[in-house]
Amino acid sequence: MNCCEKALTLFKPNDKYAEAIGIDPDGNKIKFRLFKTSDNIVGYFRKGSRKRGYRLENQNLLDILPITHYKQNDKKWQDGWKKVRARLEASGLWKNLISEINIALDIGYDKMQDLYKKYWDIQDEAEKLAYIKQVDTRLIDTNDEGKEYIKSSIIWSYAKLPKVKKMYFGKYKTPHILEQIQKAMESKTKTSQYGRASYDISFEYNPEKNKAYYSEEYKGCGNGHYFLALDATHCLFYEDD
């Protein structure tokens, strides 16, 4: 296996980017930010650029290795989800997520990474279900017809580091709106709030369901970034659309 072929193995399922350490003929270590094209050609970004790069095959390398941040990522992962859980416990929002976070933390970082990989690697659905079931039965549920299925959202969501940010409604409106949200949550009053900065901002709180949403949509467009509000100030990234 040459270095380019080996580099392809460093990409996680569905990822287009990866980081690696290349070993040159003198034994020097060179850090690369890799990307791959639709036809699996591996390249690396030139320094300071996120768009321009070169073919990896043009580099004279003896070997290419993954960058391992296991200890750092393991700690970040645990601390991150514990902080998310603490915010949810304090706010009372999204009670179902607390039990999911507890399951993920019980399973642990290593196994969650393995489950995410196996979920995409195993093509046979019965084999996939059996593998995940033997890791933890809490990842399996039964539908109304009595058929078992995988709680895929737990595997998809909690294998990753949580992305938490403070809600922002614009330079001058943010403090006032966050105060209004806090009052609404304290009084269990339904509220919707809006703002405009780099995006069209919206927030919705539903006290009956104990759920709240925050979104940043491209101006004049119905697409953007969507978050679950954790409390009156912070939100957790959910998806891009």
Image (cartoon, grey):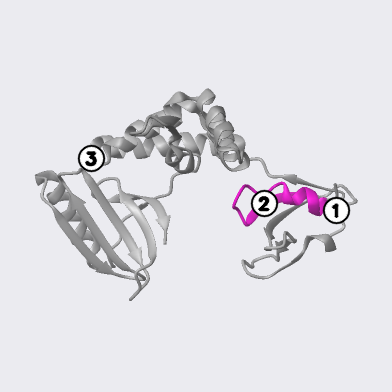
- Label 3 neighbourhood size at 10 Å, few (<14), some (14-19), many (20+)? some
- Say above or below: 217 vs 149: below
* Marks 1 and 2, the one that precedes in the sequence: 2
- Residue that carries the numbered disc 1 in the rendered image: 61
Type of the residue with mark 1:
Leu
Q: Which residues are magenta?
A: 3-21
> Which residue is painted at 61% across and 36% down in the image?
70
- The secondary structure type at the circle numbered 2 is strand
Whole-number angstrom distance, CA of label 1 to CA of label 2: 15 Å
In-front residue for pair 40/200: 40
**Of callouts 2 and 3, the N-terminal one:** 2
Q: Quadrant of the C terminus?
A: bottom left
CA distance separating discs 2 and 3: 37 Å
> Dot 3 lies on which element?
helix
Q: Amino acid at mark 3?
A: Ser
Q: Quadrant of residue 67?
A: top right
What residue is drawn where x is 61% and y is 38%?
A: 122
Residue pictured at 72% horizontal, 59% vertical: 40
Q: Is residue 38 above or below residue 185?
A: below
Instruction: Check if residue 186 falls in the magenta segment.
Output: no
Disc 1 on helix, strand or loop?
A: loop
Badge 2 amino acid: Glu
Q: Residue at x 34, y 31 (%)?
A: 99
Quadrant of the image occupied by residue 195: bottom left
Instruction: Name which of mark 3 and mark 1 comes first in the sequence.
Output: 1
Marks 3/1: CA–CA distance: 53 Å
Q: Outermost residue, right direction?
A: 25
* Residue, disc 2: 19
Q: Position of residue 224 (x, y in %)?
A: 39, 65
Report the residue marked by disc 3.
Answer: 91
